Image (cartoon, rainbow, N blue to C red):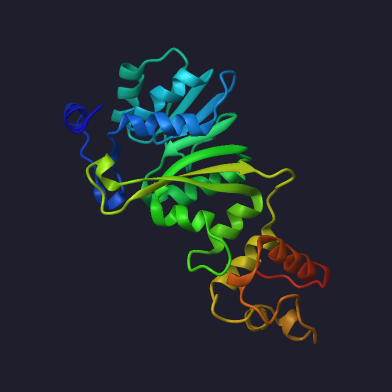
Amino acid sequence: MDVRKVKETLADIGVFPDRKLGQTFLVDEAVAVREAEEAGVSSSGTVLEIGPGLGILTSELCRRSRRVVAVEKDRRLAQYLYEEVGAANLAVIEGDALEIQLPEYDAAAGNLPYSSSSPIIFRLAGNGMRRGLFMIQKEVAARAAAVPFTAEYSRMSASLQRMYTVEYLFEVGHSHFYPVPDVDSAVIRLSRKDGAADWPEFDACITALFSQRRKTIHSVLRKSSSAYASAGTKAPYSDRRVEELTIAQMEELVRWLGDNGIRLSLS
């Protein structure tokens, strides 16, 4: 499907992409093929695809898996998928991936809208996603895979990497989309770590620390918790900044806070 075909198809079904919302459509089938290959989907498994659009990735996933469940928010695009892609192993759900009850699946994939990529990924993570492959804005992908002592290392980095092995696979230039966005994209792959589960205390701690990432951990904790301020002791790594800590060190810090009855609130 080239740019001309994408334009004609969108016009025929009455869809006019809103670039402000990050609504763009992949027009390079070679990229979709590579995505499907990197997703490593099983011929006996079910893939949950978020934001299928005109189905360029959907078709490739259908060729490689037992079943694909595609979640599309736009009614016109959902109808197009049902009628035109029409694979026997494709099910289409019309709805918002951030609101609907998610079906059972073995792996997730999608070329996610820029405006909601992070919330979608975190919702899938909270839903217990084991594996996922997503094309997202390049800058967001860099944060997801970032390491300590880099500007990109963030709350997103820590939250995702505590639960997943995050791989930054390849970049996709903006010229591969219609309409052409102002930013480039990148594809990441997430593989859940054994035993990873929700940990609200970890999320609360790193949210507080990354909100003041240039301050020492001791300074942030003193302001964030009266219990810590009056404890008369210092937490592990307290003289360092959060952007200098590995995930394992952050986990050690959070466990120390819990053992000492110190709680931080997400609010």
Q: Position of residue 81 (x, y in %)?
A: 34, 23
* 181 over 84 or under it: above or below: below
Q: Residue at x 80, y 71 (%)?
A: 261
* 43 over 32 or under it: above or below: above
Picture quadrant of residue 24: top left
Picture quadrant of residue 52: top left
Q: Residue at x 27, y 34 (%)?
A: 27
Residue 73 is at least partly visible in this image: yes
127 or 250: which is nearer to us? 250
Q: Position of residue 85 (x, y in %)?
A: 34, 19
Q: Position of residue 135 (x, y in %)?
A: 42, 43
Q: Position of residue 33 (x, y in %)?
A: 40, 28
Q: Residue at x 72, y 85 (%)?
A: 229
* 149 over 43 or under it: above or below: below
Image check: 137 left or right of 162?
A: left
Q: Residue at x 58, y 70 (%)?
A: 243
Image check: 134 left or right of 226?
A: left
